[in-house]
Amino acid sequence: MTPDRLAFDLQRTLDELQQERERTQRLQGELEHQSRELDRLRSTAHRESNSRLLAEEALDEARDRLQLAVDAAGLALWDWQLPATQVFLTARWGELLGDIAADGYWEAIDLRARLHPDDIEPLRVQMMALLEGRSQRAVVQHRVRASEGWRWVETHAMVAEHDSKGQPLRLMGTLADIGERKRIEQDGERARELTEQASRAKSEFLANISHEVRTPLNAFMGLTRMLMDSPLNADQSSWLALMDNSAHELLDLLNNLLDLSRIEAGQFDIENVRFDLHQALEQAIVPYAEQAGEQALDFRFELPPTLPQWVMGDAVRLRQVLNHLLSNALKFTPRGGRIEVRIQPIEPVGQSPKRLQLQVRDSGVGIAREHHATVFDAFTQADASTARPYGGSGLGLAICAQLARLMGGEIDLQSDPGEGSTFTLTLPLRELDQSPLSASAELQEVAQAGARYVGLVVLLAEDHPVNELMMRQLLLRLGCIVRVARGGVHAIAQWEQGGIDLVLMDVQMPGMSGLQATHEIRDIETRRKLPRTPIVAVTANAMPGDREACLAAGMDGYTAKPVSPQALIKEMDRVLKLDDGLAEPEQAPATPAPAPVTIPAPVVPSAVSGSRAAATHLEALDVEKLLRRLDGDEETLGQLAQAMRADLASRQSELQKALQTRDSAGAVAHAHGLKGSLGSMTAERGARLAKGLELAARSGDWHLFARALPLMQAEARQIDRALADILQARGRDLFDTKL
């Protein structure tokens, strides 16, 4: 081999070695890179492994805490995968049932079989709302059958998963034993019932005691007054005056006890009728203004011009609250002091209603602030010591607060010792849009209305002679032809004779009632295909729902007794479909309407005029108002007085018999009849007492009936004396005329 060839081979070998070395270095570099990548991956895998272990540990810890909470709460967990027919329940469910405590699946039909029959529907409604997607959560209390009987549980449910269309795929929830909670609730309800029973028993006891004491007290007061009219020396007169004052104070206390017991027993009714607010306030305040003058007090009172005159409410209770407040003001204000009565309507602000605010301010002894919170509590006074100089039972302000609440208002106190007191009564002010017509305007409206009723044949179904006289007189003044039916059967017979344009139907009549008679008339019209005869209920049933009952029976209209001429005319126009008085009824003859007649102002009989008008028994009857209703017809007034006296005596006898025999139906019938006739005769106080008797008889409360009947009898004696005066005056007028 030549040296050149050797050198060439050597050089090539060196080059190959160099290339091999470079490849080796590259491989070594790649190995190092792969080693580093492997180390990185190994490190990452280690970290992830640690994280997973930590997450699993955290999840296990959370599960443990949740299980502890579930165990502590005594909850059973359930899981329902739809549409499977089995529900998974934890071991607690078995414990609740007194069965094996183990997790497992339960058939839905078996779970339903354990439900109380009364609870199936409420639970089904809630579950259907979840399954139909109308709700996402539900809570239901129900009973399940356990080994020891029915057990109350509370089920919470929620939708845990939805499909792509939003429909529920999975329901989950909890179930808890609430037996103890239900027991506590039942115990609380029972305790409330016992408390209410105790309150009613206390109120009943107070009412009975008040009644039992009142009877001998009335005799005592009457005898005291008789002795005061007999010859006495100065000491005897003074002693009897003290006895009389003490008796009146005791009577006031009994009245307050009776009112308070009736309020607490829920037997105290608040009326919502139209009344003259100005008159009611003056009647309540003026007597105290006179007493203030006798005590050298500066009494200030004024009705603001913005005060509405005619409102809806309870005038009697309003006066009662004012009487208590003014009596206290006089009692606690020393001579030379000041009493001020402020009255103002408060306009509505935002959504608040219009209100009436009455303030009674005095410059008396005042009340410490620490006593303000209890001053309206029963039997509580600012000075509770037995030596307090002003006396009193502490019932007046409690009754004021209760009456204010019953009338939808409130009463407030502002006072400091030595600075006087201000009591503020705030009541809803339900102002009427139109004032009642004056006597002359009322009579003129009746006269003008008669032009469109001339010849109208009206069937008056009325069993009470007093109400019949009143209604017939009004209808005759309207130009109507009147037929009278006594009772429902007679009304149907009269109607079947034909020619009747309108029926005025009393509701409560002996035998067949007005409602039954109306049903029969409507049935006959349907069977015989007769035109419909308008029927208007004229009834003393003026409780909520009475109007609806009349209309449901087939009547076309309704007006309450005592009948207002305007209300009756308006209802007659409506059912006869008269157009604002311009159209005449189809049945009326086509004769020209007579010109309106001028009706003279009513004349009050001489026996009820002058000083005698102030007599107590004449307050039981508003003779002037009654004469206005009769268009000044004193002859009809005499007939009414005679009929009313006979009816009054008969009804009292029947009511006494009903009480002795516990005849609820008879008591309701006679009290209802008396209520209607007294209302028609303007004996409003007597009508209210008769209404109370009717309500007591309807509820079967014979203790209340027995307490109210003597009050009705006492009022009846006053009414009878007023009626006797009317008859006496009528007889004297006839005698004078013959002379």
Image: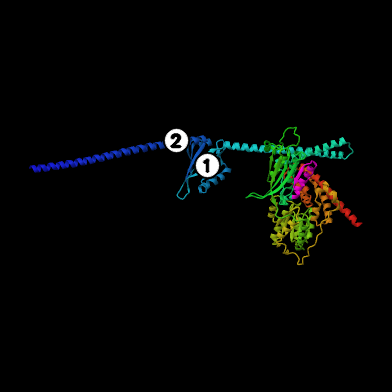
Residue 292 among those drawn in magenta: yes
Specify few, some or many for label 2: CA neighbours under 10 Å numbering under 14, 14-19, or 20 or more.
few
Whether residue 564 appears in this view of the structure is: yes
Q: Earlier in the sequence, mark 1 or mark 2?
A: 2
In x, y percent, where is residue 634? Answer: 84, 55
Which residue is more in the foreground, 653 or 427?
427
Q: Nearer the viewer, residue 277 or 180?
A: 277
Q: CA distance from mark 1 to mark 2?
A: 25 Å
Outermost residue to the left: 2
Quick check: 180 above or below 695? above
Q: Residue at x 73, y 59 (%)?
A: 572
**Disc 1 target residue:** 156
Which range of residues does the magenta coloring cover?
Answer: 278-301
Q: Main secondary structure of the magenta part?
A: helix
Residue 426 location, quadrant: top right
**The residue positioned farthest toward the front in the image shown:** 336
Q: Quadrant of residue 557?
A: bottom right
**Quadrant in which the C terminus appears:** bottom right
Image quarter (top left, top right, bottom left or bottom right) of the N terminus: top left
